[in-house]
Image (cartoon, coloured by chain):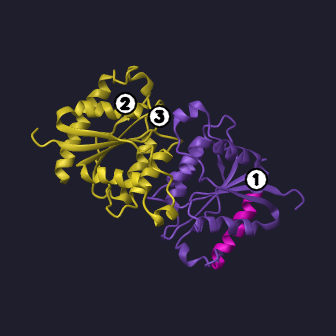
Chain colours: A purple, B yellow
Amino acid sequence: MENKLNIIGIAGSLRKNSFNKMLLNELFSVAGENWNSQVSGIADIPLYNADVEAIGIPESVTLLGEKISNADGLIIVTPEYNYSIPGVLKNAIDWLSRLKTAPLKNKPVGILGASMSLTGTVRSQSHLRLVAVMTEMLIMNKPDVYVAQAQNKFTEDGKLNDEKTISVLKKFSDNFTNWVIKIK
Amino acid sequence: MENKLNIIGIAGSLRKNSFNKMLLNELFSVAGENWNSQVSGIADIPLYNADVEAIGIPESVTLLGEKISNADGLIIVTPEYNYSIPGVLKNAIDWLSRLKTAPLKNKPVGILGASMSLTGTVRSQSHLRLVAVMTEMLIMNKPDVYVAQAQNKFTEDGKLNDEKTISVLKKFSDNFTNWVIKIK
């Protein structure tokens, strides 16, 4: 593809060997040449505090917002903590929603998630879709990607060894490419 | 009452003049002599990271857990950020859920919320009730306290000037006293 899409990805887990970070890398690997893919961290986003905001938005938030604004699409991979969105991911979104540049607004977004449970982040993603309404993210509807029992689906070096999951990632990346182009 | 209940309260907003902090103080004021009330902050709870947990739970988390374990009941007042639980509050709960002492498990909990919107944190509280299932908090069902348009219901020095809200806080504190005693 001549005009590659710039896609930024963030993971809702700060753990180094997080299954969700692995899933993000595998999605980018599957998308291959079609995307200029970039992973961005959220470990340096501080706790949201309106008093801090009144003084000035932290630089880490502004930088993440710029990266998202400059990207054609955003991928969010999220674990599920206590039946909902991890606090660390929600906190990053809370900050991003305060930027005057509104980087999330009308941004094509794809969401996926991996967990060791049988339900594979279905509740976390469900809450994230509601958060998307307020922040005006445009989350692609299908395919749903709920990687359940993730501990059985990745090799020790973080590669997927589950054909069904690889296949759904292929479909996801194709659909997301179309979704981004459709919205542009 | 001879045996006062020890009640700890946390607010899901870090802002100094937060309506939710005001609401918490007003609830404790209404409960008066019946409770030994204590407010605890969450501003010093770091972002959850499983790699940090593997090295050792941060002291601020352990201390908050101890306070909750030692209390007869927990009050959580929550704003609504982007149609859900504030990241900062969820993050504190995520950490607390990792303590071996399980301070939230089987703890009588009361939740309330205030916002400037017309819906008064109904979505945030709804998500919090789901989080309570996983963390095994025992959240009192009624009365619901959704303080909508909070900017019109507090004086400049943080006192409620809305009779209906004061009345529901009275009912809430009476019911919560009974809820704590019932579960004990």
Q: Residue at x 79, y 60 (%)?
A: A35
Mark 2 sits on what residue? B22
Residue type at tag 1? Val
Alpha carbon of mark 1 to alpha carbon of mark 3: how far?
A: 37 Å
Q: Residue at x 79, y 47 (%)?
A: A184
Is any part of residue B122 visible from this angle?
yes
Is any part of residue B131 visible from this angle?
no
Residue A14 image-quadrant placement: bottom right
- Of badges 3 and 2, nearer the viewer stands 3
Instruction: State left or right for residue B98 relative to residue B81.
Output: left
Instruction: State left or right for residue A66 relative to residue A42.
Output: right
Residue B168, position as x, y percentages in the image: 28, 32
Between A105 and A12, the one lying in front of the other is A12
Mark 1 sits on what residue? A180
In primary-sequence order, the first of circles 3 and 2 is 3
Tell me the magenta residue range.
Answer: A161-177
Instruction: State left or right for residue B14 relative to residue A147.
Output: left
Residue type at tag 2? Met
The answer to whether marks 3 and 2 sit on the same chain is: yes
Mark 3 sits on what residue? B15
> Is residue B35 shown in magenta?
no
Alpha carbon of mark 3 to alpha carbon of mark 2: how far?
A: 11 Å
Name the chain letter of the residue that bears numbered label 3. B
A77 in relation to A106, above or below: below
Helix, strand or loop at mark 2: helix
Q: Quadrant of the N terminus of chain A?
A: bottom right
Residue A115, position as x, y percentages in the image: 52, 67
Q: Residue at x 23, y 42 (%)?
A: B176
